[in-house]
Image (cartoon, rainbow, N blue to C red):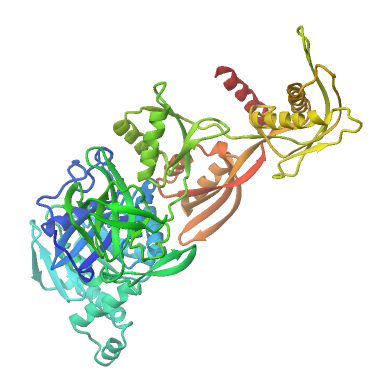
Amino acid sequence: MKQYAPADIRNLALVGHQGAGKTTLAEAVLFKTGAISRMGSVDEGTSNLDYHVNEIDRKTTIYTSIGSCEYEKTKFNLLDTPGFEDFHGELIASLSVVESAMVLVRADSGVEVGTEVVWEVVDEKELPAIIVVSKMDKEHADFAAAYAQIRERLTPKAIPVQIPIGEGESFRGLIDVAEGKAYQYDDAGKATETPIPDEMKSAYEEAREELLNAAAEHDDALVEKFLEEGELSYEEIIQGIQIGVRDRAFYPVCAVSAQDGGIGMRPLLHCIKEYLPPADFRTELAGLRNGEECTIAAGASAPTVARVFKVSIERDAGEFSIMRCFGGSIEAGQDYHNLTHDRSERVTQLFSLEGKNREKIDRIGAGDFGAAVKLKETHCGDTLGDKSVDAALPPIVYPEPSSRVAVRPAKDGEDDKMAQGLSRIRDEDPTFRFGTDQETHEIVLEGQGEAHFDVILERLARRYGVEVTRHEPRIPYREALVSSIEVHARHKKQSGGRGQFADVHIKFEPNERGAGFEFVDAIVGGAVPSRFIPAVRKGLEETMEKGALAGYRVVDLKATLYDGGYHDVDSSEAAFKMAAFLAMRDAFKNGKATLLEPIYNVTVRVPEEVMGDVMGDLSSRRGRIQGTEAIGHLQEVRAQVPLAELYRYSTSLRSMSQGRARHTRSFAGYEEVPRELVKKIVEQSKMEAEEG
């Protein structure tokens, strides 16, 4: 495999709203550069990059795929990322290992909510970017409208370096603003230089003036020449654009149609090579040493440092740890160090990944990508490198789960098999969590939405042969007293031989919220012998775990044992534990007991036109609106909502907003369940207990 110097590598992630054409554009780049012999089709299931079964079935990208090609002696590594929000963990991981991004905006749809979401990540990671107005050949394509939305909703620093000639079916060419030339394309995608159309000259002159100003602004020599002569050479414009893009002072905007022969593909390749920073752009990386921030050297001459940003388990080929090498090189047959967990790791075999194709290689050079097979000690997000490096790259921060679902095997006896399969899937997907809820005893999956769960469970069935049923998770309510009560409980049993006897007087009181359990021994005069008092406490604690009202854990309780009785022969620890159980049961049955429910902070970002619907829906879910705030052109709604009302909320929100709203959630605490709902929940819990 040909090796490239980091200066001759461009690493970029293709990002954008679902359906923006990222995969098609990546395929077109690979085809135009000769990396593939024919363009695949997402719609026809023949894509070189969307090749997994569930991607073919859904006709959408779910997993990041890498495609590489060469253009003018420069290697492009294209990371094709998912646009659907349920799979944004792949996007976030990909943006942690590239120098730049290509942000796609549909010419016929403009800036969509998914575009804004990915732009936030690009901006947060301070990545240089090119913005591509895609699908210029589509009906209703409108470059001017899309560009206006880019300036309004993404960044005012967007500047066109190309202007389309025609739109929709009449899209036939481009004006290269920097070069000052027009190109028209035939049906085969071949470009011919033509004069700038008269009707386009005004738009071209306006765009060129803006580009010249931006190109000259960040270089003193260029500023001086531009002020003196009012013009820059083509080479000077390119130089100025390079500086501006790398400093994130502005973002070039291009226009393309990637279908068929493709219009604007060669100019786009030129922009990638000339404008985007090379793989040696950063000579230092942010690192962590013993929890403290530090820097790590990068580059071909630096010690080896690589990040595993993705794990892919394939039935026939095994487990691939996909990595980006930042410093030095990774070589097959060598020992390295897991710098994240301080463990030794041997790399046995290495492969290059070109979509669905695998090629064995001996080395991953600085600035490049590859995959190691069956690493034992290194997992997704870990830093691998030379032992002399005493720091690791910061962890990848993935989105918190926003949905929950409970599952059980469709066939009896497959619990272990299901758990093993889910565990392997979790190794690939850090945005997915699962475990047994210790209170409800259910297997609960946490993820990014219904589509995320669909894919996980399809993989579980296809790869590990486990079919599951899913249902709404039980809510982990809590039981608590709201007022004090004194209880006298006696356990007495006589059935021949030694009997059982214990008598207790206990005062139960609600404790401060979050204070937990408090037991007070107030026995005077030996009414309950000291050897039995720990058994009373133990009986109360065990009953609190099991629940005294509806089978949920009791919290925040103060119990004072102040009187009782015993029998010299028939009293025992077991008897006093039973008496304590009876006392608590009576207290919750006859006292003022209630249920507490988990409350979540919910933040929704939504277009203003559907804000009223979203707020009304949150209120109907017993949510309390905490406030609203304008975030760009979106509105952010903050509310506190019971967990019981949030099942499948992501699906409901997506439907309500036509996919333009998104939400995050985090645990806030426990609050009392409304009195009218307590009886219903208690009855339902008893019914479930009787059934099984």
Relative side of 176 to 186, left or right:
right
541 shown above or below 42: above
Image quarter (top left, top right, bottom left or bottom right) of the C terminus: top right
- Image position, residue 509 (x, y; %): 79, 36
Residue 71 is left or right of residue 132, and the answer is left
Q: Is residue 387 left or right of residue 51?
A: right
Identity of the residue furthest to the bottom in this view: 228
Which residue occupies 54% across, 52% down?
A: 637
User: Where, quadrant-wise, is the N terminus in this rendering?
Assistant: bottom left
Residue 656 in sight here: yes
Give coordinates of residue 268: x percent, y percent.
Answer: 20, 65
Q: Is residue 112 visible?
A: no
The residue lying at 69 percent from left, 37 percent from top is 555
Residue at position x 56%, y 52% from top?
Answer: 638
Q: Nearer the viewer, residue 474 or 613?
A: 474
Residue occupying the far top of the picture: 496
Which quadrant of the structure image shows residue 581? top right
Q: How many numbered dots are placed on residues in this image?
A: 0
Q: Quadrant of residue 449?
A: top left
In the displayed orientation, state which residue is furthest to the right.
525
Q: Position of residue 84 (x, y in %)?
A: 35, 47
The quadrant holding residue 515 is: top right
Task: Choose between 575 and 446: the one closer to the eye.
Answer: 575
- Left or right for 493, reference 671: right
Q: Position of residue 433 (x, y in %)?
A: 45, 42
Camera-side residue: 241 or 335?
A: 335
Q: Is residue 466 above or below residue 173?
A: above
